Amino acid sequence: MTAAVGFAAVFLLAATGCGSDGVIARTADSVSRAVTGAASEQDAARVAGWLVGSFSSAEQAASSGEHFEVVLHHARIWDERDDGIWLYVEQALAASTTEPYRQRVYRVWLRPDGVLESAVYELPDPLAYVGAWQQPGRLAALSPISLSKREGCAVVFGTITDELAEGSTNGTGCGSTLRGAAYATSVVTVTPNTITSWDRGFDAEGNQVWGAESEPYEFRRVADRSD
């Protein structure tokens, strides 16, 4: 998601009327789980499975003057690891898919406190891995120690049901210098076939300086992980 669009991978606000510091649970069961953080390894596998694949915002872009047509890819990497589910993420404008403006690695994992988190990492040489979503094996020589973790930028999923997962970053801890920003926020909703994301940057006074202003980006699945 560059200055023009803002993301994620990564992982963003559905139209729930929430602010950038959290999400609103939709059912009594969701409220309970949001309070207790009682996620499971099954939840982690389900959410990661929903993320894997290729997505497009073409439908939204066709009817919106604010949103660009963006393509988003998540591919699983490092299947042998047992410390979470690792994903390579690539995002680009549909008009220039070979020049992605965002490349990240996500770690979808169940924290010791029972909370499901998607941690965000930067690659050491992003341009060397353009298109790796089609050939995830190209990242086999890397490991978590090769990456740079973006502290404060993890998405924590506070609502998880059989049909959706909703999460967000926490407060102002995700630093950003893009276009005069001091910090960035992300709010995300993931379902089996959609990813709704809202990435925004704010200056030190809390004024938004980048990202979609009126509503989040809406990505629809265009290919499964097996394609």
Image: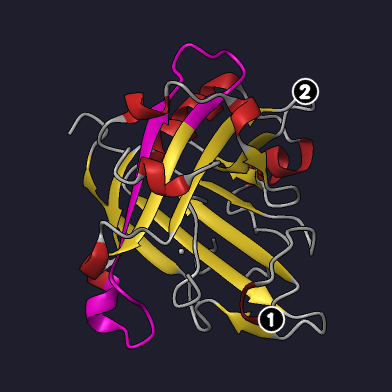
Q: Give me the disc on residue 180.
A: 1
Q: Is residue 65 above or below residue 193?
A: below
Question: Which corner quadrant of the image does residue 137 belong to?
Answer: top left
Which residue is rendered at x = 50% and y = 75% of the image?
A: 3
Q: Is residue 115 magenta?
A: no
User: Residue lying furthest left in this view?
Assistant: 227
Q: Is residue 16 visible?
A: no
Q: Give me the disc on residue 97.
A: none
For the C terminus, the image quarter is: top left
Work out whether mark 1 precedes mark 2 in sequence or the reverse, and give the earlier one.
Answer: 2
Q: Are there few (<14), some (14-19), or many (20+) residues within 10 Å of tag 1?
A: some
Question: Which corner quadrant of the image does residue 196 belong to?
Answer: bottom left
Q: How many numbered dots are placed on residues in this image?
A: 2
Q: Is residue 79 magenta?
A: yes
Which residue is rendered at x = 57% and y = 13% of the image?
A: 82
Q: Position of residue 106 (x, y in %)?
A: 54, 38
Question: In the drawing, does residue 191 fall left or right of residue 16?
Answer: left
Question: Which corner quadrant of the image does residue 148 belong to?
Answer: top right
Three-letter amino acid code at disc 2? Pro
Q: Position of residue 215 (x, y in %)?
A: 48, 77
Q: Is residue 33 above or below residue 154?
A: above
Element marked by disc 1: helix
Element marked by disc 2: loop
Q: Spatial distance from mark 1 to mark 2, Cα to Cα?
A: 36 Å
Question: In the drawing, does residue 65 fall left or right of residue 223?
Answer: right
Image: magenta residue range:
60-86
Q: Is residue 100 visible?
A: yes
Q: Which residue is mark 2?
A: 112
Three-letter amino acid code at disc 1? Gly
